[in-house]
């Protein structure tokens, strides 16, 4: 009886490993395309260059301290004419705010992703309503607004202080 116990356990172990071998979860890449702007040299010329797979890094206080200049750019965006209409509505009633969402690394750039919006009451409590998604290139400090319907980044021209 004992001489059959070890081989039986080995067979059960190997069989259980094979049952779970195909059930791993796969993570699909989510890339952001850059919109073509006439005369914009930052937009890649090759369409395939725009489909970079990205790595998302959660923000922590050390990253936020090193990138403190992003707050100045976000402040300039909400006060600029380049801001979308929903942001301007929130700016009028002084409820505009932004949340540091993540740090997004792609093959071509690293972006700080911000949610621009305001706290709103949805009937059950306060929630943050997003009015715009900003992608700020950490190297060139260029600002892009994410266009959700077209899944692309639109370059913005924010006046410097």
Image: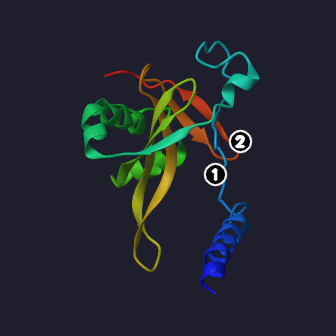
**Residue ID at (33%, 52%):** 94
Q: Is residue 21 visible?
A: yes
Q: Position of residue 33 (x, y in %)?
A: 66, 33
**Quick one: quadrant of the C terminus?**
top left
Query: Mark 2: which secondary structure?
Result: loop
**Residue ID at (47%, 60%):** 129
Q: Nearer the viewer, mark 1 or mark 2?
A: 1
Q: Is residue 21 above or below residue 159?
A: below
Q: Nearer the viewer, residue 17 or 159?
A: 17
Q: Nearer the viewer, residue 10 or 141?
A: 10
140 left or right of 155?
left
Residue 39 falls in which quadrant of the image?
Answer: top right
Badge 2 is on which residue? 150
Q: Is residue 20 above or below residue 112?
A: below
Q: Position of residue 37 (x, y in %)?
A: 66, 21
Q: Nearer the viewer, residue 112 or 13?
A: 13
**Quick one: quadrant of the N terminus?**
bottom right
**Residue ID at (50%, 43%):** 56
Residue 50 falls in which quadrant of the image?
Answer: top right
Query: Mark 1: which secondary structure?
Result: loop
**Disc on the earlier residue, 1 or 2:** 1
Query: How far is disc 1 from disc 2 in space, using C-alphas?
Result: 22 Å
Badge 1 is on which residue? 27
């Amino acid at each position: 009886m004992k001489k059959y116990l070890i081989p039986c356990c080995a067979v059960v172990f190997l069989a259980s490993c094979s049952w779970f071998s195909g059930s791993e979860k796969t993570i699909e890449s989510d890339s952001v395309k850059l919109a073509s702007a006439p005369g914009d040299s930052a937009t890649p010329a090759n369409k395939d260059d725009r489909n970079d797979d990205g790595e998302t890094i959660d923000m922590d206080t050390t990253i936020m301290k090193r990138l403190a200049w992003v707050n100045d750019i976000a402040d300039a965006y909400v006060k600029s004419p380049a801001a979308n209409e929903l942001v301007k509505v929130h700016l009028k009633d002084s409820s505009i705010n932004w949340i540091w969402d993540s740090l997004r690394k792609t093959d071509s750039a690293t972006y700080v992703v911000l949610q621009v919006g305001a706290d709103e009451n949805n009937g059950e409590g306060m929630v943050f309503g997003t009015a715009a998604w900003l992608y700020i290139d950490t190297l060139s400090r260029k600002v892009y607004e994410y266009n959700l319907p077209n899944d692309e980044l639109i370059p913005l021209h924010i006046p410097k202080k």
